Image (cartoon, rainbow, N blue to C red):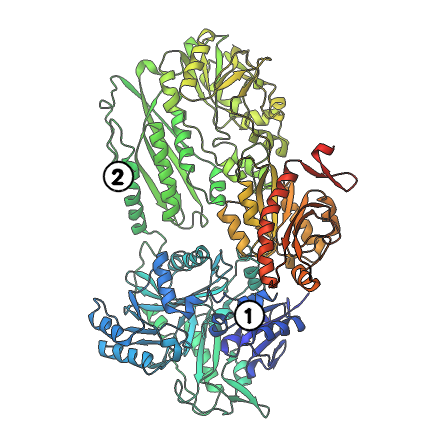
């Protein structure tokens, strides 16, 4: 269904917004309040006279006219709270709240915010007294020549002085002469930064940042950047001074950090964020923030937007911006030139006729009007900046030439404009510049910085034989100093495989380094070798310092666990080899053993020897291409809770459990003389690794009922319908390593393993293997996997278990009763959500909140859930054609999280009949009255109007009729004589916070149920 949109504002920016929105197939009509002559009547676009300063009247207008979305252009309405007021009235509004808009409305707030969050900006001080400001200008140890009115001054409240005296004069004009009115009651004195100024804007939904192409504005009135400051005399986009790498740096270090900081401070920022940036020799620094599209930047950015603007705005409002990444035209430049009235930015005449508009459009140009009006059917001037002529061409020079032709076509008396828009970019492009390695995508400085960051991490892995000091051409290791007399060396190399893909998708890189080290050192352990040193290889298309440092820190930590030195490595930045955000890893381990300690002892292995299995931590690092395919076809995502019985973590975290490193615990046992062979169960699973350490004429028979199979293998087998052979050939199935020992030594070896805190079992024996027979036979594997590995079959207690009467083992830890998995549905603050979170965190609680769903993005309830570490989902009801479709989407997510109980906590949607029936007896709601009195909305108003002396709240099962379900609990609240809706509501909320958690506990524990007869049934009544 096509939407009606209201754009607030009257300038060239608002004309551009209306023009771009009108191109959307989703938009039926664009109204502009108050608009200008260009938006008066143009296809889908029309003006409206509704006042935008009376927010209550504007909200009513939007409801009456069925406006689907309001888009605010200028800064003043944002600072006045238009977004919050319209949103509270139920009107969707695009832009930041008044609190978030302080980034623009208060220069002081913005500066203090940047200081709190480490966002690079000029040095500064704020003052409320002119004499103190002037004293600072004269005494500062930096050029304090930029004087800013702290408040809103229509883009003109900044004076860049050429001397200290001129700066002091600017302070007097602002603070004493009131040049900018109340905006100048506080001034900010800033350091004069030197460099190129650019405008970097982004869309943001409060979490995701989608950067726009960088633009450059021209503030001075006259050519050559001379004359007084203005609101902007022209702009172009993209600015070639900002490379892709530099834009990424600005996005991460400034835009994303700003959005994250606002969220942390409880003022989530939604809409368009504009950062005025100075490109200094020390890197990009923020000059100012604006909380909306710039004018005239908007006139050059939106013509380059290939995506549907309405879709991008809706995704931003719904918190789905990560799903709708805006697409921009490539190999194009947009340039706009402002035509201003004579006398601007001072006094100017109005009512002058404008001609040639159609001629300019016939040249393939866009004329976005600003200070224009209709008079007697003619377009006349009515403002300082009258209009902009915009050209979009294949390059900057062509765009400038085309725009100049438009200037010749459009005429009005005394028009003032510049013909040198883009001159700095043209000069930049004409500079003779030799290519650098950085231009090619390799940042040597970043690589050097990484080395400095990881040096202390590597240094901490030093050991006898090696004092690690990164930076040389090669590393040295002294075998004699390590205590070896007649050593052999063993070496191994490996990677992590596509487990990396999951780490990258989950943005969890802390443990992948342990996988790398483990895969290498466990391999050389099979030769009986002690790991001595390790080298890593990290490669990516673009070096991300934070990610790389995290991975290498994990490698260093694992080296310490393994007892080997991180002697060196290679970090390779290879542009175009890897997609953004992806990297690859490889590792190399070198170890040693005395000549007589080499494994395996093939000549000693005989039929009847015992095979001891040492527990794995899970999948380790093999089989992940199959794992990823299974997950892709399943109903789960990596962010979903792990399958039942796999712990209280996400599926992604479970799959990323790091590979166990066995060298520290098992090396002493391998060197005891009791072990004949050691097999690392790596790629190839149980079937292909054990034969690597056996004589050709021998094999093994294993019984899967003798060891514990982690539940993740059961889930993979079931979801992937994997055969027994596929499981045994692909995965370790719970056995990370296998040892071959004499049968009479098995008990002693098991005890030794247990002392080293490893779990182990006798899992089989060595048998003769006739030619052509399989070297490994595994009995009962599928049955055991399908039983989730819960029953062990050993006749003696091994590892950390206790003996059962039937010879099985069980873990000594107490099995906790299963807690009910609860999902909470909200629409805003989730008024009772915190009380539910707090109560379910109690040790004796029978419930566990596993999910919070909101039908609105960026609401306070989502933040509460995230602070508590609870997964969240936003499912916007406006994205679905019907109530049933929306409910189906909600139900799918509830199933994904294996939900047992649903709680409605301020969820402002009426649920469909099929949904309510499905969750009958498992869905709770709380209502602010003593039902059955005062059903529906406005319960407090009804109670006060009825004159009752007691009201309260009710927790009930949800039924198809509103507020008609069976009552679980009620709490009475007296109505006081002086009560208003607000005071009564606050006291009832306190009661709600008490009884909602209590009612949830009753249902989760099974104490209260909905009987087959539809009535409440207490446990003792059954």
**Between residues 7 and 507, which one lies in front from this camera angle?**
7
Q: Is residue 187 left or right of residue 787?
A: left
Q: Is residue 463 above or below residue 603?
A: below
- Residue furthest out toward the top: 744
User: Can residue 242 be seen?
Assistant: yes
User: x%, y% of residue 359?
Assistant: 54, 85
- Percent x, y for residue 416? 41, 86
Q: Is residue 868 positioned above or below 951 on the image?
A: above
Q: Nearer the viewer, residue 838 or 777?
A: 838
Q: Which residue corresponds to mark 1?
A: 71
The residue under label 2 is 470
Q: Distance of mark 1 from mark 2, alpha carbons? A: 55 Å
Out of 218 and 253, give the one closest to the viewer: 253
Residue 897 appears anywhere in the view: no
Residue positioned 32% across, 54% down in the render: 437
531 and 65: which one is in front? 65
Q: Residue at x 64, y 57 (%)?
A: 908
Measured along the vertical axis of the image, is residue 696 above or below residue 554? above
Q: Position of residue 55 (x, y in %)?
A: 56, 73
x then y, percent, for residue 455: 28, 40
Q: Residues within 10 Å of mark 2 (few under 14, many from 20)?
A: some
Mark 1 or 2, which is nearer the eye? 1
């Amino acid at each position: 269904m096509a939407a009606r949109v209201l754009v607030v504002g009257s300038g060239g920016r608002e004309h551009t917004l209306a023009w771009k929105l009108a191109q959307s197939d989703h938009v039926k009509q664009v109204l502009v309040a108050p608009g200008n002559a260009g938006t008066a009547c143009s296809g889908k676009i029309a003006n409206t006279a509704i006042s935008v300063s009376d927010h209550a009247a504007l909200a009513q207008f939007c409801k009456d006219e069925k406006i689907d979305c309001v888009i605010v252009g200028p800064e003043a309405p944002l600072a006045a709270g238009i977004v919050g007021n319209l949103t509270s009235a139920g009107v969707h509004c695009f832009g930041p709240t008044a609190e978030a808009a302080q980034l623009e409305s208060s220069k002081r707030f913005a500066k203090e915010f940047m200081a709190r969050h480490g966002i690079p900006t000029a040095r500064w001080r704020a003052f409320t007294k002119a004499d103190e400001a002037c004293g600072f200008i004269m005494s500062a140890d930096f050029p304090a020549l930029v004087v800013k009115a702290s408040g809103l001054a229509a883009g003109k409240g900044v004076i860049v002085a050429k001397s200290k005296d001129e700066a002091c004069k600017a302070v007097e004009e602002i603070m004493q002469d009131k040049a900018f009115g109340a905006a100048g009651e506080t001034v900010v004195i800033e350091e004069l930064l030197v460099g190129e100024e650019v405008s970097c804007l982004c869309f943001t939904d409060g979490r995701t940042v989608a950067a726009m192409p960088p633009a450059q504005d021209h503030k001075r009135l006259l050519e050559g950047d001379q004359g007084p400051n203005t609101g902007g005399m022209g702009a172009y986009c993209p600015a070639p001074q900002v490379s892709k790498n530099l834009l990424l740096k600005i996005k991460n270090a400034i835009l994303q950090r700003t959005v994250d900081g606002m969220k942390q401070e409880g003022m989530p920022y939604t809409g368009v964020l504009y950062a005025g940036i100075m490109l200094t020799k020390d890197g990009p620094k923020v000059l100012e923030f604006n909380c909306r599209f710039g004018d005239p930047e908007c006139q050059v950015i939106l013509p380059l937007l290939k995506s549907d603007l309405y879709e991008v705005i809706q995704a931003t409002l719904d918190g789905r911006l990560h799903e709708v990444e805006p697409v921009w035209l490539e190999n194009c430049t947009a340039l706009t030139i402002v035509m201003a009235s004579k006398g601007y930015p001072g006094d100017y005449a109005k009512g002058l006729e404008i001609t040639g508009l159609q001629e300019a459009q016939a040249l393939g140009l866009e004329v976005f009007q600003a200070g224009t009006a209709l008079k007697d059917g003619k377009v006349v001037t009515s403002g300082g900046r009258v209009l902009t002529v915009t050209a979009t061409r294949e390059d900057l020079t062509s765009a400038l030439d085309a725009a100049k032709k438009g200037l010749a076509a459009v005429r009005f008396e005394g028009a003032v404009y510049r013909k040198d828009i883009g001159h700095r970019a043209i000069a930049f492009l004409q500079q003779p510049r030799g290519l650098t390695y950085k231009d090619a995508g390799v940042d040597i400085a970043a690589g050097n910085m990484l080395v400095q960051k990881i040096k202390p991490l590597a240094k901490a892995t030093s050991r006898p034989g090696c004092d690690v000091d990164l930076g040389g051409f090669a590393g040295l290791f002294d075998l004699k100093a390590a205590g070896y007399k007649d050593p052999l060396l063993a070496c191994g190399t490996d990677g992590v495989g596509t487990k990396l893909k999951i780490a990258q998708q989950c943005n969890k890189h802390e443990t992948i380094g342990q996988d790398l080290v483990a895969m290498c050192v466990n391999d050389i352990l099979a030769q009986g070798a002690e790991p001595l040193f390790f080298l890593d290889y990290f490669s990516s298309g673009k070096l991300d310092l934070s990610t790389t440092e995290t991975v290498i820190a994990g490698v260093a930590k694992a080296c310490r666990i393994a007892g080997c030195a991180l002697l060196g490595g290679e970090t390779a930045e290879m542009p175009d080899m890897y997609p953004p955000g992806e990297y690859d890893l490889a590792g190399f381990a070198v170890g040693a053993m005395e000549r007589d300690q080499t494994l395996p002892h093939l000549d000693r292995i005989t039929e009847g020897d015992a095979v001891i299995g040492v527990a794995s931590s899970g999948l380790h690092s093999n089989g992940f291409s199959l794992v990823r395919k299974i997950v892709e076809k399943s109903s789960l995502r990596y962010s979903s809770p792990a399958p039942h019985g796999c712990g209280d973590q996400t599926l992604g975290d479970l799959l990323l459990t790091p590979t166990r490193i066995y060298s520290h615990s098992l090396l002493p046992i391998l060197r005891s003389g009791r072990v004949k062979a050691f097999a690392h169960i790596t790629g190839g699973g149980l079937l292909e690794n054990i034969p690597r350490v056996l004589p050709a004429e021998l094999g093994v028979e294993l019984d899967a009922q003798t060891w514990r199979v982690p539940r993740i293998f059961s889930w993979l087998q079931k979801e992937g319908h994997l055969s027994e052979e596929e499981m045994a050939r692909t995965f370790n199935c719970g056995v990370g390593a296998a040892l071959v020992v004499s049968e009479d030594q098995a008990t002693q070896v098991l005890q030794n393993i247990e002392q080293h805190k490893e779990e182990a079992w006798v899992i089989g024996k060595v048998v003769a293997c006739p030619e052509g027979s399989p070297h490994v036979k595994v009995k009962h594997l599928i049955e055991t996997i399908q039983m989730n590995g819960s029953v062990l079959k050993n006749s003696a207690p091994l590892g950390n278990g206790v003996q059962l009467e039937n010879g099985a083992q069980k873990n000594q830890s107490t099995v906790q009763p299963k807690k009910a998995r609860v999902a909470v549905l909200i629409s805003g603050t989730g008024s009772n959500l915190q009380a539910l979170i707090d109560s379910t965190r109690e040790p004796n609680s029978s419930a566990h909140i596993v999910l919070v769903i909101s039908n609105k993005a960026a609401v306070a309830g989502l933040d509460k859930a995230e602070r508590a570490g609870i997964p969240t989902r936003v499912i916007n009801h406006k994205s679905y054609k019907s109530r049933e479709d929306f409910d189906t989407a909600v139900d799918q997510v509830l199933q994904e999280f294996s939900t047992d109980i649903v709680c409605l906590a301020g969820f402002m949607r009426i649920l469909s009949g099929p949904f309510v029936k499905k969750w009958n007896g498992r869905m709770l709601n709380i209502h602010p009255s003593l039902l059955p009195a005062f059903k529906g909305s406005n319960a407090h108003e009804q109670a006060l109007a009825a004159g009752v002396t007691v009201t309260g709240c009710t927790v009930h099962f949800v039924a198809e009729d509103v507020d008609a379900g069976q009552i679980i609990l009620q709490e009475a609240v007296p109505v006081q004589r002086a009560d208003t809706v607000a005071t009564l509501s606050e006291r009832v909320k306190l009661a709600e916070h008490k009884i909602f958690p209590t009612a949830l506990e009753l249902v989760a524990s099974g104490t209260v149920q909905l009987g087959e007869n539809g009535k409440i049934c207490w446990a003792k009544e059954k």
